[in-house]
Amino acid sequence: MTYNVHPSAIIDKGADIGFGTNIWHWVHVCAGAKIGKACSIGQNAFIGSDVVIGNNCKIQNNVSIYEAVTLEEDVFCGPSMVFTNVYNPRSAISRKDQYQKTLVKKGATLGANCTVICGITIGEYAFVGAGAVVNKDVKPYALIVGVPAKQIGWMSQFGERLSLPIIGTGETRCPHSGVVYKLQDGFVYV
């Protein structure tokens, strides 16, 4: 075995798990799930079939990732956050043919207890605050919070809040790394 799994975890036959991934207590990984290298899947997580998780993702305790969700590499899913895959579920009506795809791009952070409504894309290095309800696409590097989530700023790749750009240049620096970011046409670029 090329990954580490706690004895209480259930890994269905047909799940594809990358080298060096750690799977902790009471996790269920369904057949058909694809998990990359060097990931950490925290206690009591659920990974559905038709889920793709890129390399070096951190899935904290009590996270449910349902079918039709893709996480690119370096995504952080905070404790007890959840994804949906049907917009209008009913117990008595099967809507498996209506699953909507959700894409979380490289380096994004999804805060504790946030909910991501299906059918959206969360941009590279975006930062979703704890408890937010995300119901529309999120720009790369955006900082969003609230119910429903609204953008309140920008974040660096390092995870530091960026100050407003200097008037005239449209540029700002990450307070930790010193990397220069440019605000142009409503988007941040490195």
Image (spheres, rainbow, N blue to C red):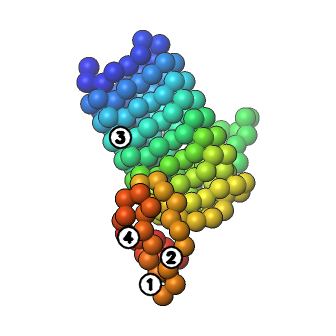
- Does residue 144 appear left or right of residue 45 in this picture? right
Quickly name the residue at label 4.
180
Measured in 3D between alpha carbons, the distance from the residue under mark 1 to the one under mark 3, in whole angstroms, is 35 Å
Measured in 3D between alpha carbons, the distance from the residue under mark 2 to the one under mark 4, in whole angstroms, is 10 Å
Report x, y in % for residue 86: 63, 46
Marking on residue 56: 3
Q: Which circle's residue, 1 or 4, is located before the other in the chain?
A: 1
Measured in 3D between alpha carbons, the distance from the residue under mark 1 to the one under mark 2, in whole angstroms, is 7 Å
Q: For label 2, count other residues whose C-alpha is less than 10 Å away and answer few (under 14), some (14-19) or many (20+).
A: some
Q: Which circle's residue, 1 or 3, is located before the other in the chain?
A: 3
**Residue at image x 42%, y 68%?**
173
Quadrant location of the C terminus? bottom left
Amino acid type, label 1 = Thr
Marking on residue 44: none
Marking on residue 165: 2
Q: Nearer the viewer, mark 1 or mark 3?
A: 1
- Does residue 82 appear left or right of residue 14 in this picture? right
Cβ atoms under marks 1 and 2 closer than 8 Å: yes
Q: Nearer the viewer, mark 3 or mark 4?
A: 4
* Picture layout, residue 168 above or below residue 68: below
**Residue at image x 42%, y 12%?**
7
Depth order, front residue of 121/23: 23
Amino acid type, label 2 = Pro
* Picture layout, residue 152 above or below residue 171: above
Q: Which circle's residue, 3 or 4, is located before the other in the chain?
A: 3
Number of on-image labels: 4
